[in-house]
């Protein structure tokens, strides 16, 4: 008779043979142990939805807007379309004829969004674009109660906002989880008010992490296929324990099942600052940077193709005072690896003003450590530094299909090139070797075969030394590149 927990049936006549052939008792025990099935799909999201929904809110805002005529006022399309009739010009013509040329008038524009209570005192997380410019904000809870809300603070760079309602009781709230612990393929649950349909619950998986979608300088989105639509903005993305791992923020308009959420680990410190002071203070290093590619790494002999290349050091800023130089490749900050320019921006932004940062750089074939005292990022001052980088100048001589002229001091200053050294590319012949290599008008050739070049003659001397020449170029866009040209 088989043991109740065993999947083996023992036949008495074969017992001796089986004993001789049987594995060790420990192995037999492992084999006999029933295998627990892996739950690929949760049986239900009901408990999670019931527990989390009381802390998820519907947000309605009103703001003043201008309408050009009666038709636009009553028939405008929602969700941010700039043109109320889109491409439907016949409708525009019809309403223009019907209403006539009416003067602009003010009306109240309404929008919808979501949010979640992060503190029993009534602090609510949502997106900046949900409440930006709002004259009034109304918050509705799952139990039907409504409150007027005030803005505590906003951060446009990460599209986060913190608002607050004042209730006579402690409010239900959600706990923040750990977005770094998320793995692609894990389940996520989104709760919000898509198209005004309050407390809609959707589920899906984490499709990707670290997505850069061009929303801002600190893009690091979680991508999910949980259904997210207009009105979900600001609502929570939850893990299966009911903790917030993301703030639903964006969608691909033409896509299905492509939504993006701000990782809660990125949001946590920002929300803390907004709660404490109403604004966000970020660290500032004072450099222009770009990612290191394979060509640049090969050119400098750098270890691997990761890091942030310093393309410019702003005079008088922390990096300049500490001795960082253009062409340094930043590899880590305070021991944390820097693989891209965005990594560096994120790390520096999170360092408190006045703190010291140990920055490991690759410079002239070896590693060095530079200690920098972090300053406060001043966006207004930073914007004032933006320089015109359009390159002009008369053609001098041609090489590899590009017209070159020595760089003038004035143009060097506008391009941020050190010591006015280099050759300005004034023209590039279509389908020439230079064109096929990616050289463009307005680029500046700074080095050839790791040697500085100030004149066309110096460049030609490097070309004459071998079958090819390796150029290090300051691109017109402000980035740096390394290209190889064959004779």
Image (cartoon, grey):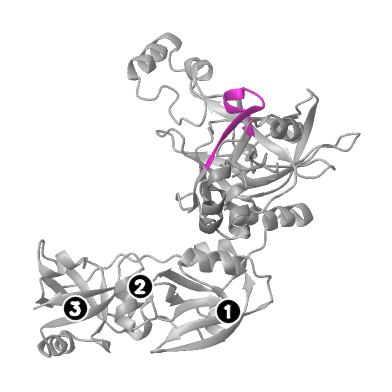
Q: Which mark's residue is nearer the viewer, 2 or 1?
A: 1
Please say whether residue 280 is one of the residues in the magenta stretch.
Answer: no
Disc with the residue nearer the chain's start (2 vs 1): 1
Image point 27% across, 68% down: which residue? 391
The kind of secondary structure element at disc 3 is: strand
Q: Is residue 10 visible?
A: no
Q: Is residue 103 above or below residue 182?
A: above
Q: Quadrant of residue 44?
A: top right
Q: Nearer the viewer, residue 366 or 9?
A: 9
Q: Which mark is residue 186?
A: none
Q: Is residue 14 visible?
A: yes
Q: Which residues are magenta?
A: 191-205
Q: Quadrant of residue 462?
A: bottom left
- Measure the C-alpha gap from mark 1 to mark 3: 34 Å
Residue carrying label 1 = 318
Q: Is residue 251 left or right of residue 5?
A: left
Image point 10% across, 66% down: which residue? 432
Please say whether residue 193 is one of the residues in the magenta stretch.
Answer: yes
Which residue occupies the extreme right position in the image? Answer: 168
Residue carrying label 3 = 405
Give x and y (percent) for residue 35: 59, 45
- Measure the C-alpha gap from mark 2 to mark 1: 21 Å
Give x and y (percent) for residue 475: 30, 69
Assign the C terminus to one quadrant of the image. Answer: bottom left
The kind of secondary structure element at disc 1 is: helix
Q: Is residue 37 above or below residue 454?
A: above
């Amino acid at each position: 008779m088989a043991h109740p927990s065993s999947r083996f049936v023992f036949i008495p006549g074969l017992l001796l043979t089986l004993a001789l052939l049987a594995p060790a008792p420990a192995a037999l025990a492992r084999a006999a142990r029933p295998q627990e099935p892996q739950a690929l799909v949760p049986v239900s999201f009901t408990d999670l939805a019931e527990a989390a929904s009381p802390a998820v809110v519907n947000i309605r805002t009103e703001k003043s807007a201008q309408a050009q005529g009666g038709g636009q006022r009553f028939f405008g399309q929602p969700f941010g379309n700039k043109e109320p009739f889109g491409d439907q010009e016949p409708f525009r013509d019809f309403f223009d004829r019907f209403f006539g040329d009416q003067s602009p008038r003010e009306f109240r524009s309404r929008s919808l969004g979501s949010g979640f209570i992060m503190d029993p005192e009534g602090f609510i997380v949502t997106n900046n674009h949900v409440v930006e410019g709002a004259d009034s904000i109304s918050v509705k809870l799952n139990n039907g109660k409504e409150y007027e809300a005030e803005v505590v603070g906003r951060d446009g760079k990460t599209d986060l906002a913190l608002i607050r309602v004042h209730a006579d009781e402690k409010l239900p709230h959600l706990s923040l989880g750990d977005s770094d612990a998320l793995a692609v393929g894990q389940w996520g649950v989104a709760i919000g008010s898509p198209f005004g349909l309050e407390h809609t619950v959707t589920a899906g998986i984490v499709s990707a992490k670290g997505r850069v979608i061009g929303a801002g300088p600190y893009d690091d989105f979680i991508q999910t296929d949980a259904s997210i639509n207009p009105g979900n903005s600001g609502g929570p993305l939850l893990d299966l324990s009911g903790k917030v791992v993301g703030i639903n923020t964006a969608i691909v308009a033409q896509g299905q099942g492509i939504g993006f959420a701000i990782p809660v680990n990125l949001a946590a410190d920002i929300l803390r600052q907004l709660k404490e002071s109403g604004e966000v203070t970020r660290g500032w290093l004072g450099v222009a940077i770009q990612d290191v590619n394979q060509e640049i790494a090969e050119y400098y002999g750098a270890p691997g193709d990761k890091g942030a290349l310093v393309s410019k050091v702003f005079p008088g800023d922390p990096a300049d005072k500490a001795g960082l130089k253009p062409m340094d490749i930043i590899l880590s900050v305070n021991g944390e690896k820097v693989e891209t320019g965005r990594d560096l921006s994120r790390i520096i932004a999170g360092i408190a003003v006045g703190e010291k940062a140990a920055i490991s750089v690759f410079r002239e074939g070896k590693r060095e450590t530079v200690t920098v005292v972090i300053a406060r990022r001043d966006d207004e001052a930073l914007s004032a530094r933006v320089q015109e980088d359009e390159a002009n100048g008369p053609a001098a001589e041609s090489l590899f299909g590009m017209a070159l002229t020595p760089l003038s001091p004035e143009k060097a200053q506008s391009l941020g090139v050190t010591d006015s050294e280099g050759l300005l590319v004034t023209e590039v012949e279509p389908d020439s070797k230079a064109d096929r290599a990616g050289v463009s008008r307005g680029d500046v050739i700074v080095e050839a075969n790791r040697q500085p070049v100030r004149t066309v003659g110096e460049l030609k001397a490097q070309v004459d030394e071998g079958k090819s020449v390796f150029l290090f170029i300051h691109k017109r866009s402000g980035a740096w590149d390394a290209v190889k040209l064959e004779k």
